[in-house]
Image (cartoon, helix red, strand yellow):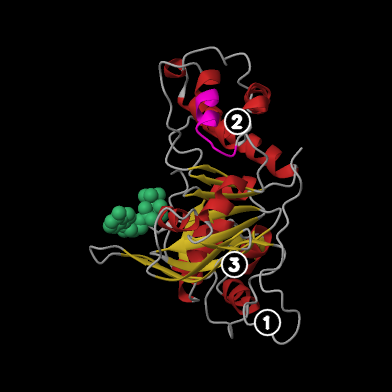
Amino acid sequence: MAERATVEPDTGSDSGPDSRPETGPDTVIATRALTKRYRGGQLAVDGLDLAVPAGSVFGFLGPNGSGKTTTIRMLMGLIEPTSGTARVLGQPMPRATRTVLPQVGALIEGPALYGFLSGRDNLLRYDSADPTADPRTRRTRVAAALDRVGLTAAGSKKAKAYSLGMKQRLGLAAALLQPRRLLVLDEPTNGLDPQGMREIRSLVRELASDGTTVFLSSHLLDEIEQVCSHAAVMAQGRLITQGPVAELAAGARGRLVVTTPDAGDAARVLKEQGVADVVVEEDRVTGEPPDDRDRDLAEVNAALVSAGVRVRGFGLERASLEDAFVALTGEGFDVAG
Ligand SMILES: Nc1ncnc2c1ncn2[C@@H]1O[C@H](COP(=O)(O)OP(=O)(O)OP(=O)(O)O)[C@@H](O)[C@H]1O
């Protein structure tokens, strides 16, 4: 079993005000004002301050093009930031790439596989290309990694005969050939069918339960809600918010739900009262509560009653991460992906 990931404090100073509150012994990834402008002028990541706590399953959420892959490539030392800093496992990137990367299992842009080799031989080959890997334990480690991702039985099959989900699991197995303190997975369920998605998600949960920190990017809100303890939300290269998933969702106001036999009248009154996005579903009328904090919801209720609407139920529904995203960005989110 992997040790729980811990990182030594990176400053060594234990006095004075902390000028970098997001870094600390329990922060596995910390960036400060991390920025990437591509040669063509595209500002892909803009002043990102990210803090990933040790032991978390951290979801890096954002629509396509929001800068997730660019951030991951900077974290892994694959590209240089234009400005700002990134520390991974307490070390500066890309300067410490050589010491940091052996402790990180990464699955970025799909695994590179040789179709004519079996799954097992792919892993043996991958491991032998790693100068830090011990050849004496290679076969045992490959067998353990195959077992870990449920590919023992399919280990002798050629990789070209694998389903996309099996290929993705083989990629994860490659990331697990050595004990890792951190796993970085870029859209690990992209392109998979629902069954494949379930398999990868439960594998991620399992890995995390051993204490390995998992950083995974996704454009799927429900995936983040199902799998992650923490999340950061990106839109157009900027960080919108980050923190424990439960708190992010709680920060958003839920939808107002009115149950009434007079749904048509209720919808009209709610709109007059500043409720947005009013939706009628039989005897349920829902909408975004007015932004105006001075307007008490009791007033909205009173307006319904005085208009003769028979109110059977009136309340706020628990907010989801999707509500939080919509509230924070003013945009909808393509949950179906
Ligand atoms: N090599 C590159 N040169 C120029 N622009 C780029 C390059 N790579 C990405 N971009 C641009 O930077 C922005 C962020 O892209 P990035 O791939 O980081 O987003 P993403 O959130 O990972 O999206 P996706 O899930 O689609 O990969 C996009 O507008 C993209 O077109």
**Labels 2 and 1: the sequence-earlier one:** 1
Q: Position of residue 193 (x, y in %)?
A: 48, 29
Q: Front-most of 247 and 236?
A: 236
Element on which disc 3 rests: loop
Neighbour tally class for label 3: few under 14, some 14-19, many 20 plus, Cα within 10 Å: some
Residue found 63% across the figure and 72% down from its top: 22
Is 161 placed above or below 316 here?
above
Residue 282 visible to an observer of this rendering:
no
Q: Position of residue 200 (x, y in %)?
A: 58, 34
Give the CA separation, mark 3 to mark 1. 30 Å
| Residue type, numbered disc 2 | Glu
Query: Marks 2 and 3: in contact by CB < 8 Å?
Result: no
Label 2, on which residue? 199
Neighbour tally class for label 1: few under 14, some 14-19, many 20 plus, Cα within 10 Å: few
| Residue type, numbered disc 1 | Asp
**Labels 3 and 2: the sequence-earlier one:** 2
Residue found 55% across the figure and 24% down from its top: 124
Element on which disc 2 rests: helix
Q: Which residues are magenta?
A: 123-132
Is 225 placed above or below 27 here?
above
Quarter that holds the N terminus? top right
Residue 142 visible to an observer of this rendering:
yes
| Residue type, numbered disc 3 | Ala
* Mark number, residue 252: 3
Q: Is residue 116 left or right of residue 189?
A: left
